[in-house]
Amino acid sequence: MTVRERRTHAYQPTLPLWQPTSNNGAHGGTCDAHSGTRDARPIVSIDTRNAAWLTSDGPPPARVDVGDARTMTKTVIYTHDNLPGPFALRTLTVSGILIALDDDHAFLRADGETLYGRAAIVASVLPNRRLVACGRTAAWVWLGGDFPSVIDALSAIHYRAPILGRPIHVRERRVPPNQTKQIGPLIVTTPERTVCDLAMCTQDEIYDESLDERILQLLRQFRVDVQDCLLILEGCSYLHTAQRAREVIADFSCIA
């Protein structure tokens, strides 16, 4: 599956803050992810009838709950409600069939090993459908590994309440459409853009969370051109972290 776009364009300072299309218009302000407002959403299943499953380069995950076609969903987050009980959740986690997100939520190891499965997991975890996964969260979608301890997303809305014990770090950045990709039910930043976002993290985050290794994995696995990343960062001069990010990425030019 082709995930890079060789002609990566720097984004323009005049572009509006990324805001997805909504029938009700743009939203702003502060929202509690568990407040029960219209932006909050359950984290249990994904509607398999969504046409986004059909627009990506490959089939969706095969495990689908059998039921009425009008309500057919694919379970991606398992809780006590869709298992016999806490003992079953613990047993499946200990056996390695499920990967725990916290004491009450888990996902199938098999889903975590596929691109579409990881995209469905993140889409189910995010507090609303209009968020774009970026940074550490996007890196997990592209690469897998351990689920990140922080959820990074593009949004003009700030979320105070954590999701599954993880804080939501909102990035209010201008990102043009050619730096995002639809993967099943999720919109995620491209590998090039994800490299830039990781490089704009603080030095402590980069080294304490081994984000330099994630950057190198993205560069190699998706054959990302360092020059494409530097071109993206040229349009980020208004961000105080952009210059340091250029230095971080330039260090990989000889080894990627």
Image: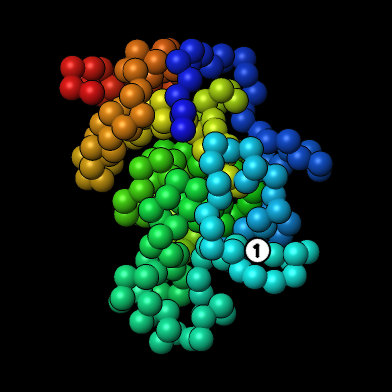
User: Relative to residue 69, is residue 160 depicted above or below?
Assistant: above
Looking at the picture, the colour scheme in use is rainbow
Q: Residue furthest left?
A: 255
Q: Nearer the viewer, residue 119 or 237?
A: 119
Image quarter where the C terminus lies is top left
Which residue sits at x=46%, y=70%?
Answer: 105
Quarter holding residue 88:
bottom left
Percent x, y for residue 45?
60, 63
Percent x, y for residue 222?
36, 29
Percent x, y for residue 196?
38, 27
Q: Is residue 119 left or right of residue 219?
A: right
Q: Is residue 78 left or right of residue 256?
A: right
Q: Nearer the viewer, residue 55 or 245?
A: 55
Q: Which residue is label 1 attached to?
A: 73
Which residue sits at x=39%, y=69%?
Answer: 98
Which residue sits at x=36%, y=48%?
Answer: 144
Which residue sits at x=65%, y=63%?
Answer: 73
How many labels sit on residues? 1
Residue 240 seen: no
User: Relative to residue 34, is residue 57 depicted above or below?
Assistant: above
User: Relative to residue 13, is residue 221 depicted above or below?
Assistant: below
Q: Is residue 125 left or right of residue 207?
A: right
Mark 1 surroundings: few (<14), some (14-19) or many (≥20) residues within 10 A: some
For numbered disc 1, what is the local secondary structure? strand
**Mark 1: which amino acid?**
Thr
Q: Residue furthest right?
A: 23
Percent x, y for residue 54?
65, 42
Residue 179 seen: yes
